Image (cartoon, rainbow, N blue to C red):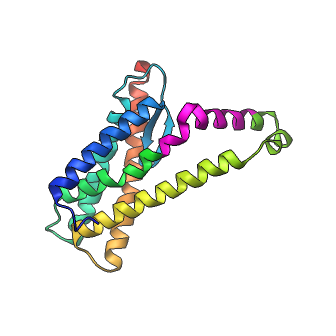
Amino acid sequence: MFENISSRNQLILGIFITIAGSLLGYGLHLRYFGAFKITTLSPKAPFYMPLLDNMLIILITLLCLFLAGLLINRRTRALDILNAILISRGPLYLGCLFNINGFMMAQSALLLAQVSKGKDAALSMPIWPMLLMSSGLTLLSVLSIWLLFAGFKTATNGKGAKVIWLFVLGLIATLLVVNLSLASLYTAFDFLF
């Protein structure tokens, strides 16, 4: 896929996907608080919060995967890694659609209320909505990671196990840095939201 589209067109598509996903997140009251995590958006949060989340996650992912890419091929371009990241986040943004009319938040609140009542009460509620959401979100996450790997592999022109191992290490570094940096950044500015 990434070989057949020019870098310029990939960048345009990726920027469009990111802006659309950020607006979708805001419209459905969700934000992207981790590399593969969607959480509830505070009603007091400004409209740009999902876009800010995305920009920070994309920047951190770019740094981690670009460094991993340089270990595979010194000619790896940051633009190619950026394009792969921007496009691969598209399926994650589709996960927001599970919250149309507050469905995801309502189901989560219902489950938490049932669990707080006790084990028997939690077992009495229908599980299909949560199974549907969790299965859908898992599938979208797997698709996102697959697209990211395909773009990373194309950008580095890598082959063999080295590409897989460095991609996995870059992804783990991304997850750690994103979770630590976003948590500390938003804790520092928690009074704003």
Q: Which residue is drawn at 22% across and 73% down?
A: 157
Out of 15 and 145, give the one closest to the viewer.
15
Q: Split into 4 quadrants, where in the image is the N terminus?
A: bottom left
Quarter of image, res 110? top right
Nearer to the camera, 2 or 37: 2
Q: Position of residue 109 (x, y in %)?
A: 66, 33
Task: Say whether residue 148 is magenta.
Answer: no
Residue 99 in magenta stretch: yes
Residue 11 against residue 115 in the figure, above or below: below
Name which residue lies at 31% across and 43% down: 18
| In the depicted structure, whether residue 73 falls above or below residue 148 | below
Specify the segment rendered in magenta. Answer: 95-113
Instruction: Please indicate, yes or no, whether residue 148 appears anywhere in the rendered image.
Output: yes
Q: Whole-percent x and y of residue 64?
A: 29, 55
Count every numbered label the image shows and give the total.
0
**Outermost residue toward the bottom in this view:** 160
- Horizontal relation, residue 183 to residue 110: left or right: left
| Residue at x 40%, y 64% (from the top left corner) | 146
Q: Does any portion of residue 169 appear in the rendered image?
A: no
Q: Position of residue 72 (x, y in %)?
A: 23, 71
Q: Residue at x 19, y 54 (%)?
A: 9
- Residue 63: horizontal and vertical position, in percent? 26, 52
